[in-house]
């Protein structure tokens, strides 16, 4: 017997081998114009009886599990007490657990007090995945992110101060051609202010069901960037990132035309050199048919 997931089910690429427990369904915000991951779901929180039964079942079937991801998109929206109960029970039932992680929205991190975040960290919650998307306040408003660059920085620093590993995502092309420079400039500024442990760069990929909403909310004609322009954005971003602490950078998501990875600050020049090489060798570009979110 396996878990009866409520689909669609999403997890970060780095959680491909993790056990996934759905402790919430959907997203409590669900208004980001670029994201249709949970549009088919009404947000709800799963009962303790259901969650506990699934943990018990999986602990018997896969006792050697080392990583657990708590889905859906909004697990941190749970009360601190309930989240702590779930995390502690997972740690109790799986003796080899190395990491428990979940998605986190800036607004949910800011709702928690520093003491509550430390409480969950001490219980055994290790890592958050947070979407920065862009550091431009103008674009954040246009894509109805429900956050500003200031609140994103505050939320991320709050998580890191409480001892969490933080992995952040940004979206190439989110400002279109018109706001490309502002998008990258603001995004680099936010990254520099936070210096998260990980940064992942995706490329804007609008599903048909959400494209009209995105265009309407954007409030002006949106002209998508080309693959070459997305690579220009990536080059500009890397050139403007200036951090002292190590930041592992990955632009290898399935939505990207080009793949690059390295660690700031030591690999900055290497990544810049590789982008210049890729511009001279367009044949290394991932075919459109092999891309996806």
Image (cartoon, rainbow, N blue to C red):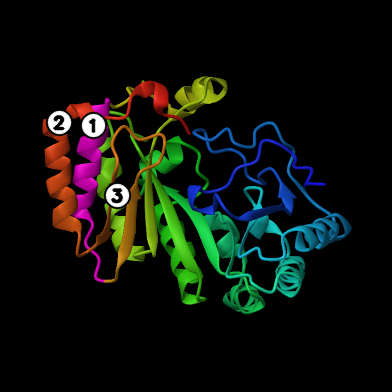
Residue labelled with disc 2: 281
- Picture quadrant of residue 280: top left
Q: Which mark is residue 23?
A: none
Q: Is residue 167 magenta?
A: no
| Label 3 packing within 10 angstroms: few (<14), some (14-19), many (20+) | many
Q: Secondary structure at mark 2?
A: loop
Q: Is residue 136 visible?
A: yes
Q: Report how far apart the C-alphas of labels 2 and 1 lie in the structure.
A: 6 Å
Q: Give x and y (percent) for residue 4.
A: 79, 43
- Which tag, 2 or 3, sits closer to the chain's start? 3
Q: Is residue 289 left or right of residue 25?
A: left
Label pair 2/1, CB-CB below 8 angstroms: yes
In three-dimensional space, the C-alpha distance between marks 3 and 1, rounded to whole angstroms, equals 29 Å
Q: CA distance from mark 2 to mark 3?
A: 29 Å
Mark 3 residue element: helix
Instruction: Please state if 11 lies on the left or on the right of 272 as rendered.
Output: right
The residue indicated by pointer 1 is: 284
Q: Is residue 181 visible?
A: no
Query: Mark 2 near mark 3, Cβ–Cβ under 8 Å?
Result: no
Q: Is residue 67 above or below residue 81?
A: above
Secondary structure state at the residue bearing disc 1: helix
Which residues lie in the magenta part? 226-244
Front one among 216 and 61 = 61
**Tag 3 residue:** 186
What predominant SS class does the magenta segment belong to?
helix
């Amino acid at each position: 017997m396996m878990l009866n997931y409520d689909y669609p089910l999403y997890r970060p690429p780095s959680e491909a081998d993790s056990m996934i427990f759905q402790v919430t369904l959907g997203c409590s915000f669900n208004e980001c114009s670029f994201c249709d991951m949970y549009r088919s779901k009404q947000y709800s929180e799963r009962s303790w009886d259901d969650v506990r039964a699934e943990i018990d079942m999986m602990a018997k079937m896969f006792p050697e599990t080392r990583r657990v991801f708590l889905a859906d998109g909004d697990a941190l929206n749970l009360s601190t007490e309930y989240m702590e109960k779930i995390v502690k029970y997972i740690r109790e039932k799986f003796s080899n657990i190395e990491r428990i992680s979940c998605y986190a929205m800036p607004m949910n991190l800011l709702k928690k007090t520093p003491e509550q975040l430390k409480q969950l960290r001490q219980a055994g919650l290790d890592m958050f995945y947070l979407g920065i998307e862009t550091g431009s306040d103008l674009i954040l408003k246009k894509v109805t992110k429900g956050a500003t660059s200031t609140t994103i920085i505050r939320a991320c620093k709050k998580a890191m101060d409480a001892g969490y590993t933080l992995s952040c995502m940004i979206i190439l092309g989110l400002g279109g051609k018109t706001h490309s420079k502002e998008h990258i400039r603001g995004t680099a500024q936010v990254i520099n202010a936070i210096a998260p442990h990980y940064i992942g760069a995706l490329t804007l990929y609008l599903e048909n069901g959400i494209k009209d909403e995105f265009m309407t909310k954007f409030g002006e004609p949106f002209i998508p960037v080309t693959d070459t322009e997305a690579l220009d954005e990536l080059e500009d971003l890397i050139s403007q990132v200036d951090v002292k602490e190590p930041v592992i950078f990955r632009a290898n998501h399935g939505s990207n035309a080009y793949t690059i990875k390295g660690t700031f600050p030591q690999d900055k020049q290497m990544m810049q050199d590789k982008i210049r090489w890729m511009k001279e060798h367009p044949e290394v570009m991932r075919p459109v048919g092999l891309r996806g979110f």
